[in-house]
């Protein structure tokens, strides 16, 4: 590990190229310590703290929320004692953000609020009354009269306890990003209650994406070092759009000279949590009916302090506390706040065990049906010895914190087919394929024809064997159908439908891009050249599609002829 001193920081990296200009040699580690890395900006964080050296090499993704094994050594001991940061040098403004965030703030914070509709107006009132850390709130809205009304009315509000409330000032467009926090609440195109739009959030997204994008580009031009707070719906989609658009040049190419991921914060989950709490209070939980049910029920939650697990059958949950413990078992921290019960804070049970087979055994289970969603947390080995059927999905099921009706419907369909497959009622790995005698015949015949086509091509053009690697990486478990399933997945065939071999083949033929695979046709006819063979080797997935297309459309004779 190479150490350098730069503007009061101790920078550490594995390679010289990561250090900024002006970084000087230093003999020993000191605080503040920042590790420099270079990772894919589209999939990795930009600047974040660590408390243990093992966190430095954690894979990016939601799995980093789970505890890691402590590292050993002098550097690890230093990190445990003083903490450290990780900076992704793939972002061109990473070092300026590091400097800005480390600088002490002498005065109160300045917040810019854009949009003074129902949401923005309510937020502004809350910020005026509760924004103890704010010195000033800058407001901006195309409706100038609305700005003037709020400026006049809210600056007449006085504190009941004598404390100073933040000043509300009208902001000009050129000053939008002269602030510490930028809050975007503007929205357009909200469908009416009588509209036939099923997914209101996505309708809003299409209308709001371009609008918020213009502000993302302003933030980029202003070299904004503060926090971009996305509040209008759909929060998650628009937050991602802000990050992406701020990091693109006018040509649309990514240069990652805009906002870091940590500079964009969506505030939708808090709203969702509050909404869930409202409906829980309004609709209630029939605890008596749950306790009277002949079906036994239990849950797992974890005490936040010390991560102590609590495995609770229903009869061990105090009367009147079932709702609280249900919320505790789903408190996916830090995305959702910990649930406090009788002075103790609890987290999602997944931080102890995502699949509590041991609890099921203690409660009298004689056979287990386990559904593995590969969620956040730890999945302990099943040591019960009980007969177990495991249900898993080949497909990504989406962000567990993204509450979208279309995604929910898709996952319900996939879950139904995954369950049938787990109990031996279906064939296929990625796709739901009928399991009967006709399928057995059709699958065997397909694989025989596919192998013949591939063998003939490889005999004349050995370089095309990379298609085997593509098939292996697809990891399809049904060997006879594996090439067809892998090709269908690549072209985007819908996995939520029920297929036969014939209908899956038809769906592939209707969906595949003929213009991409027609270029490989000479290889099958025996008239191809070295360049076409090399192209097939460089695009193994596309060539696998071509092999499947040839298998499904060619005549019985599949041999490659000699020129």
Image (tube, rainbow, N blue to C red):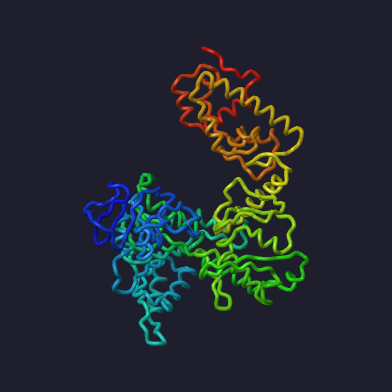
Q: Between residues 554 and 362, which one lies in front from this camera angle?
A: 362
Q: Residue 136's x, y, as percent?
A: 34, 73
Which residue corresponds to the image point at 57% horizontal and 20% vertical from the top-left?
456
Q: Is residue 298 left or right of residue 402?
A: right
Q: Is residue 353 left or right of residue 65?
A: right
Which residue corresponds to the image point at 51% horizontal and 67% vertical from the top-left?
270
Q: Is residue 128 left or right of residue 290?
A: left
Q: Between residues 79 and 187, which one lies in front from this camera angle?
A: 79
Q: Between residues 139 and 61, which one lies in front from this camera angle?
A: 61
Q: Residue 481's x, y, as percent?
A: 65, 34
Q: Is residue 274 left or right of residue 420?
A: left
Q: Is residue 459 visible?
A: yes
Which residue corresponds to the image point at 32% horizontal and 49% vertical from the top-left?
14
Q: Residue 61's x, y, as percent?
A: 48, 53
Q: Residue 78's x, y, as percent?
A: 34, 62
Against 240, is 495 above or below?
above
Instruction: Residue at the far bottom: name it.
Output: 161
Instruction: Residue at the far front: name it.
Output: 73
């Amino acid at each position: 590990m190479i150490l350098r001193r730069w503007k009061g920081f101790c920078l550490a990296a594995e390679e010289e190229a990561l250090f900024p200009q002006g970084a000087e040699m230093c003999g020993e580690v000191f605080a503040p310590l920042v590790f420099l890395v270079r990772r894919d900006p589209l999939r990795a964080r930009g600047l974040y703290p660590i408390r243990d050296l093992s966190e430095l090499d954690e894979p990016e993704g939601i799995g980093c929320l789970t505890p890691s094994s402590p590292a050993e050594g002098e550097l690890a001991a230093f990190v445990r004692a003083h903490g450290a940061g990780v900076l992704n040098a793939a972002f061109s403004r990473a070092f300026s953000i590091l400097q800005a965030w480390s600088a002490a703030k002498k005065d109160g914070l300045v917040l810019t609020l854009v949009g003074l509709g129902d949401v923005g107006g309510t937020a502004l009132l809350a910020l005026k009354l509760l924004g103890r850390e704010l010195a000033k709130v800058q407001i901006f809205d195309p409706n100038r009269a609305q700005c003037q009304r709020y400026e006049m009315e809210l600056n007449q509000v006085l504190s009941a306890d004598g404390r100073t409330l933040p000043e509300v000032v009208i902001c000009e467009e050129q000053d939008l990003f002269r602030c510490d926090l930028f809050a975007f609440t503007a929205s357009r195109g909200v469908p009416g209650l009588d509209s036939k739009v099923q997914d209101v959030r996505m309708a809003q997204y299409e209308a709001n994406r371009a609008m918020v994008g213009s502000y993302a580009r302003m933030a980029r031009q202003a070299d904004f070092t503060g926090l971009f707070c996305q509040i209008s719906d759909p929060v998650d989609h628009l937050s991602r759009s802000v990050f992406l658009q701020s990091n693109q040049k006018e040509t649309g190419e990514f240069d990652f000279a805009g906002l870091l991921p940590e500079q964009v914060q969506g505030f939708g989950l808090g709203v969702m949590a509050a909404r869930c709490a409202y409906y829980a209070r309004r609709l209630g939980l029939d605890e008596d009916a749950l306790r009277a049910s002949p079906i036994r029920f239990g849950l797992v939650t974890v005490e936040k302090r010390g991560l102590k697990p609590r495995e609770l059958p229903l009869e061990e949950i105090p009367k009147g506390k079932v709702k609280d413990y249900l919320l505790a078992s789903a408190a996916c921290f830090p995305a959702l706040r910990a649930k406090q019960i009788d002075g103790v804070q609890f987290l999602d049970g997944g931080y102890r065990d995502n699949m509590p087979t041991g609890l099921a055994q203690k409660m009298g289970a004689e056979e287990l049906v386990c559904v593995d969603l590969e969620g956040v947390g730890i999945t302990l080995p099943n040591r019960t010895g009980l007969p177990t059927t495991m249900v898993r999905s080949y497909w990504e099921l989406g962000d567990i914190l993204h509450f979208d009706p279309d995604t929910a419907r898709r996952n319900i369909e996939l879950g139904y087919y995954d369950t049938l497959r787990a109990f031996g009622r279906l064939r296929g790995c990625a796709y739901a394929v009928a399991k009967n005698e006709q399928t057995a015949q059709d699958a065997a015949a397909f694989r025989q024809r596919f192998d013949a086509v591939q063998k003939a091509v490889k005999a004349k053009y050995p370089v095309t064997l990379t298609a085997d690697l593509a098939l292996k990486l697809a990891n399809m478990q049904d060997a006879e159908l594996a090439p067809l399933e892998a090709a269908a997945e690549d072209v985007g065939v819908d996995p939520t439908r029920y297929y036969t071999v014939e209908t899956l083949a038809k769906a592939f033929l209707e969906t595949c891009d003929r213009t991409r695979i027609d270029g490989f046709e000479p290889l099958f006819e025996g008239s191809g050249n070295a360049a076409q063979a090399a192209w097939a080797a460089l695009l193994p997935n596309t060539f696998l599609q071509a092999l499947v297309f040839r298998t499904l459309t060619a005549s019985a004779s599949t041999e490659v002829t000699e020129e």
